[in-house]
Amino acid sequence: MQIISTNIAKPTTFIWNGKEVTTGIYKIPVTTPIFLGKETVTGDEVSDRKHHGGEFKACYLFSADHYPYWKNLYPHLDWTYGMLGENLTITGLNEKKLHIGAIYKVGDALVQITQPREPCYKFAVKFDSNKVLKQFIDHGYPGTYVRVLEAGFVSTGDVFTLVEKATNSLSIFQFFELLFSAEKNKEHINIILNQEAVPQKKREQLKAYL
């Protein structure tokens, strides 16, 4: 996996149900290295601290390999990397091979795979389509958040090197499928319950299905 674009956002506002909302989903590529901090990317707008940023969502990665799928669905949009709201656009990122808890060295940082992106209404506003939320879920390739174990700068061209494999884990693809499936796989839930790379709140939500 290799970084081909580093992306950050300035605050953007829009009106939603009569209220002004600020978001950091409108990310654009930058030409300088970006700093992955323990709870956020330095200089990147994180407006909704309840659902974005923090220890388990410090940085969002999305695969450049999935861009053709989205461009085909929404050819009229102004496409640049960062369009899916990611801080790092990565070649070779495959959610079926990326496992919760795995640790990677990239640039000066050490990161751990934590959980998939769950789409929200801001994503629909950006794409100007409510259909995009279901399309995102149905596609099944949501990218991943990472926990930053060691803060540091990363740059375009930096490669992810596996430092520690995940054990008794699920792939990001399986975790995403578990989150949105009507019939929950109890074996998969039990695996997640033992994953320290998944926030306690998320584990408790899934535990309710047992």
Image (tube, rainbow, N blue to C red):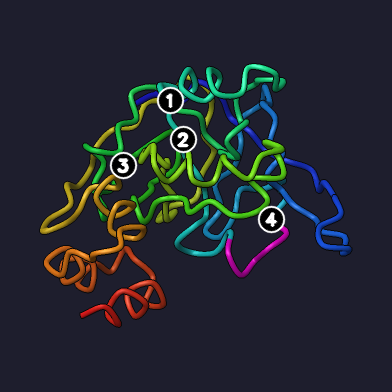
Q: Residues within 10 Å of mark 3 (few under 14, many from 20)?
A: many
Q: Residues within 10 Å of mark 2 (few under 14, many from 20)?
A: many
Query: Sequence-wise, which precedes: disc 3 or disc 2?
Result: 2
| Magenta-colored stretch includes residue 48 | yes
- Mark on residue 66? 1
Q: Which quarter of the picture shows residue 206?
A: bottom left
Q: CA distance from mark 3 to mark 4?
A: 24 Å
Write the start and end of the magenta stretch as one range: 46-51
Residue 78, given in percent of the width and then of the height, sits at 72, 20
- Mark on residue 114? none
Task: Please tell me whether mark 1 or mark 4 is closer to you in this view.
Answer: 1
- Mark on residue 46? 4
Nearer to us in this view, 29 or 105: 29
Q: CA distance from mark 1 to mark 4?
A: 24 Å
Q: Residue at horizontal 57%, vertical 35%? A: 84
- Mark on residue 104? 3
